[in-house]
């Protein structure tokens, strides 16, 4: 009788081996999500706070994962805000067979993704109008900033009676600055305003001196100064501008709304107008919980970059958990999502991977943001 | 060669009597012999690692991290003292113009390469001078920044940040030695702190310093500092995410020791690669476990081989015992390996010889009994034949035909009884006889006695055996019926056939005795002694009798069958 071939002890051993196999099968599986952003240097706050937001979301998702479930790891690459850095980061992530990337964070670097099909890029912050409507591998969580630029111009002209403006922009993120500037100027002109002067600088250059640039821009006594730059540069520029011309209305692009802006700007930032697509003054429980968790984890306040990176990580976790592997599969799955539950609002991707959001205007008051209705 | 069929032995044992098999025990023992020493090895190895090596390692790690913490604190104190010194020098400067201050800062900075810049902030919070010159910050009011208003006489250490002028990770150390005096702020280059910490540690150690929020401020991989990597979650215990000191923790693949720098709110982490630490220990363990494993496998192989031989001996013994059961002797001829089995087999052989001898004795006794029985049956038969012969002689002297016929019938009846005994002593068995053979011989005698050459005889049907106690009444019944047929059915040389048919009908036995003569009137039948005898004997056998006189005469006798080999077994037990 063959059934007697295995004595009871052997059967018990076989069962034990099977249990061990089952236990091995229940061991956590892991998947990697890429990250590309500027993590070093003066402009790194956007990338660092974005990385921290994504990291927080993955840590939360991993903590919630059931036994044997998929765990996620963030593979962060520093693009140093340069094309070379971006291409090197892409090479590294492709070599690791990663399918989806959170980033890039600036529109200038995001524009480099047009020629890249080996990765799916989900940019939390790139918002230049020129990136919209393109069927490429770049999906974005931030709507076009041009709407915000137009709203800013209209608000400055109507509420603050600004009639003349000077503009300072960072040409290293030229695509963003150009789109923003064009939208602002068009709207400002429609409201009866006039741009008196424009100056650019390169944030990547050493020893850029803002004082002479500002002296030139303010020499015509504009009603307002528009700064299109990163948070820390915007803070220094506005500090200096307020010193040179205390009654000046200062206006900043949403790009600057990082923690650096308030940290380095201090009380000199009071009265500065902002366009922003998220509500930094939100008191919704989900957002408050996120801010608390972020502060607890990283010891500082989150920025809009943290918020959208947090959402981006959640979206990619959902797609990868559903079995999407290749960049094309991930893109298809993201575009097929009927509604995406963001931390502050629901949204959906357009057919070309863009999103549409409102552009509320905020004013800085007492180291905080206040919405303007 | 057939494989020993141990399963058939097991199957031969009633389930209620079965216990664990020897195979199971051997399997478990061999498994234990292999696994237990391995487990002991591993546990011992772990105990050795934890008890002997780890305590020494923990002591060493704690000493290392304490030493690094002390030297790091000294480094930071020296930096504070330097900023204090720069600030105190301003007291003796006569000229506090931006140019003069910048020149002074330049001279001081040249003395301490750990700082990448120095700046002076006046009592209003305005940065009046810096070196290297920072035109974007000079002249701005930083009163809202904590480093612009440090407490008097106590240097202030800010959180790690990225320098807006250089883009490098720095901490600001600010000093003010007198109220409303100038504040000196130095940007301490964190890459220098990383280099210092790394140089303070011995080979194999990786030193990191984290600020109170868990952000890395010094690390051999300067990118972790530049990118402001935060490892609070990896170091924290509990939901508060506050960093707790660890004497021996795990961070990735490292053993980590930590020590706080209370006056700065920072923590020093000293990590040692587990692989490097455990390498020698693992190699020793591997050698230990490997040699133990080899020895265990060797022992296991020998044990298995011995077990196989022992099991083969058991199987052969089982086959030998089966042969004894089947009365095949001399087949327990194995030569077992172990003495204990040899003793057992010697006992089995002794038992085999005793069984064989006892069987021979019993066979002899049975043979003697058979001879005696055969002799008894022979004598009974002879006596009956003598009686029958006497009746025949008596008949010859009689004139009366009716009396002569009566003697003939009696003689036939005695002859039927004698024939039973003759068949029994001629046969091999005394307890059973073949009914067909018996009736055939009986009828042969009757046909001869009644001189009926014109009548043929036929007997057919099933083969039925029965014991002599039933055969004798049945023989008398058949004798009466056949005698009647020969006397009355075939008078005057009439030809015909007497037929006997034996049939098994379920639980019944059916004996049909028939002739194809003219039959007889039912009224006449009861007057003959023979037919009366038939009825009496059928009743005695608890059977039924059915007569038919259409187309000759037929008697259908049905007897209840009790068992497969006979009928009315309960009556036989009464014998």
Image (tube, helix red, strand yellow):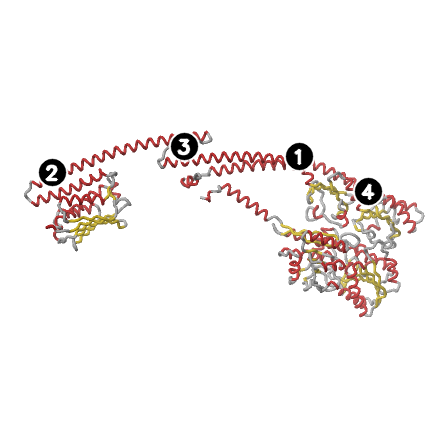
In 3D space, how far apart are the residues under numbered discs 4 and 1 (Cα atoms)? 38 Å
Task: Please determine if labels 4 and 1 lie on a single subunit.
Answer: yes
> Regarding mark 1 in the picture, which secondary structure is present there?
helix
Kindly identify which residue carries mark 3.
B333
Q: Quadrant of the N terminus of chain B?
A: top left
In front: label 2 or label 1: 2
In the image, B54: left or right of A244? left
Is residue B492 something that shows in the picture?
yes
**Label 1: chain letter:** B
In 3D space, how far apart are the residues under numbered discs 4 and 2 (Cα atoms)? 153 Å
Kindly identify which residue carries mark 1.
B52
Dot 1 and dot 3 residues touching (CB under 8 Å): no
- Front residue of this view, candidates B141 and A327: A327
**Label 4: chain letter:** B
The mark found on residue B390 in the picture is 2
Dot 3 and dot 4 residues touching (CB under 8 Å): no
Residue A90 position within the rendered picture, expressed as x and y whole percent measured from the top left: 72, 54
């Amino acid at each position: 009788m063959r059934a007697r071939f295995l004595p009871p002890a052997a059967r018990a051993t076989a069962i034990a081996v099977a249990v061990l196999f089952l236990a091995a099968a229940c061991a956590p599986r892991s998947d990697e999500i890429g990250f590309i952003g500027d993590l070093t240097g003066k402009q790194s706050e956007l990338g660092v706070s974005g990385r921290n937001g994504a990291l927080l979301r993955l840590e939360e998702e991993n903590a919630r994962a059931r036994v044997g479930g998929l765990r996620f790891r963030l593979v962060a690459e520093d693009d140093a805000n340069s094309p070379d850095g971006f291409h090197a980061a892409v090479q590294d992530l492709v070599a690791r067979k990663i399918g989806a990337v959170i980033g890039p964070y600036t529109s200038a670097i995001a524009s480099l993704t047009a020629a890249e099909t080996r990765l799916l890029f989900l940019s939390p912050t790139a918002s230049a109008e020129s990136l919209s409507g393109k069927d490429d591998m770049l999906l974005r969580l931030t709507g076009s900033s041009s709407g915000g630029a137009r709203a800013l111009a209209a608000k400055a002209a109507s509420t603050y009676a600004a009639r003349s403006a000077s503009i300072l922009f960072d040409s290293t993120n030229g695509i963003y600055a150009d789109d923003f500037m064009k939208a602002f100027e068009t709207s400002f002109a429609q409201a009866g305003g006039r741009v008196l002067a424009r100056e650019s600088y390169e944030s990547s250059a050493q020893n850029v001196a803002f004082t002479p640039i500002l002296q030139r821009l303010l020499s015509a006594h504009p009603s307002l100064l528009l700064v299109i730059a990163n948070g820390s540069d915007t803070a220094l520029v506005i500090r200096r501008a307020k010193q040179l011309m205390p009654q000046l209305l200062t206006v900043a692009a949403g790009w600057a709304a990082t923690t650096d802006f308030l940290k380095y700007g201090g009380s000199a930032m009071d009265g500065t107008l902002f366009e922003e697509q998220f509500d930094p003054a939100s008191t919704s429980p989900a957002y408050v919980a996120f801010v608390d968790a972020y502060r607890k984890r990283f010891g500082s306040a989150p920025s809009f970059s943290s918020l959208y990176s947090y959402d981006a990580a959640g979206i990619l976790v959902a797609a990868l958990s559903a079995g999407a592997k290749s960049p094309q599969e991930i893109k298809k799955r993201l575009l097929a999502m009927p509604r995406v539950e963001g931390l502050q609002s629901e949204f959906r991707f357009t057919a070309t991977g863009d999103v549409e959001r409102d552009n509320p205007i905020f004013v800085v008051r007492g180291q905080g943001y206040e919405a303007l209705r | 060669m057939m494989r020993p069929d141990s399963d058939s032995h097991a199957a031969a044992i009633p389930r209620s009597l079965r216990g664990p098999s020897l195979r199971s025990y051997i399997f478990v023992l061999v498994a234990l012999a292999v696994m237990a020493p391995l487990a002991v090895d591993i546990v011992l190895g772990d105990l050795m690692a934890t008890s002997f090596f780890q305590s020494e390692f923990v002591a060493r790690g704690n000493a290392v991290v304490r030493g690094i913490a002390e030297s790091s604190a000294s480094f930071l104190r020296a930096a504070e003292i330097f900023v204090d010194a720069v600030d105190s020098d301003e007291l003796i400067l006569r000229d506090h113009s931006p140019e003069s201050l910048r020149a002074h800062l330049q001279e001081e900075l040249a003395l301490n390469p750990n700082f990448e810049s120095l700046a002076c902030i006046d009592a209003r919070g305005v940065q009046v001078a810096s070196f290297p010159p920072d035109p974007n910050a000079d002249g701005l009011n930083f009163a809202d920044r904590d480093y612009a208003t440090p407490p008097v006489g106590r240097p202030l250490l800010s959180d790690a940040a990225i320098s807006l002028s250089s883009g490098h990770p720095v901490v600001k150390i600010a000093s003010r030695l007198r109220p409303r005096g100038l504040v000196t702020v130095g940007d301490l280059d964190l890459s220098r702190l990383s280099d210092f910490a790394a140089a303070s540690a011995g080979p194999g150690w990786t030193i990191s310093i984290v600020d109170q929020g868990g952000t890395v401020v010094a690390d051999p991989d300067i990118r972790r500092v530049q990118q402001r990597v935060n490892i609070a979650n990896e170091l924290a215990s509990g939901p508060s995410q506050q960093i707790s000191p660890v004497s021996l923790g795990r961070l990735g693949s490292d053993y980590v020791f930590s020590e706080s720098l209370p006056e700065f709110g920072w923590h020093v982490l000293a990590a040692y690669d587990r692989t490097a630490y455990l390498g020698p220990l693992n190699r020793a363990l591997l050698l230990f476990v490997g040699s133990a494993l080899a020895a265990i496998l060797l022992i296991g192989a020998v044990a298995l081989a011995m077990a196989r031989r022992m099991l083969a001996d058991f199987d052969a013994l089982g086959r030998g015992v089966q042969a004894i059961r089947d009365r095949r002797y001399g087949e327990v001829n194995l030569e077992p390996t172990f003495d204990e089995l040899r003793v057992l087999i010697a006992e089995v052989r002794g038992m085999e010889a005793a069984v064989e001898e006892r069987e021979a004795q019993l066979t002899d006794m049975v043979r003697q009994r058979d001879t005696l029985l055969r002799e008894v049956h022979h004598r009974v038969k002879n006596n009956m034949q003598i009686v029958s012969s006497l009746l025949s002689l008596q008949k010859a002297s009689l004139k009366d035909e009716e009396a002569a016929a009566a003697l003939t019938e009696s003689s036939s009846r005695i002859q039927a009884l004698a024939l039973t005994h003759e068949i029994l002593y001629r046969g091999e068995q005394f307890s059973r006889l073949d009914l067909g053979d018996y009736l055939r011989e009986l009828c042969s005698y009757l046909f001869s006695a009644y001189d009926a050459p014109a009548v043929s005889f036929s007997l057919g049907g099933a083969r039925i055996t029965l014991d002599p106690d039933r055969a004798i009444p049945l023989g008398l019944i058949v004798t009466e019926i056949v005698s009647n047929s020969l006397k009355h059915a075939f008078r005057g040389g009439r030809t015909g056939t007497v037929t006997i048919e034996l049939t098994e009908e379920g639980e019944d036995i059916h004996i049909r005795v028939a002739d194809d003569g003219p039959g007889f009137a039912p009224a006449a039948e009861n007057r003959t002694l023979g037919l009366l005898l038939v009825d009496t004997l059928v009743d005695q056998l608890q059977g039924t009798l059915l007569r038919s006189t259409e187309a000759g005469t037929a008697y259908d006798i049905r007897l209840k069958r009790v068992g497969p080999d006979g009928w009315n077994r309960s009556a036989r037990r009464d014998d």
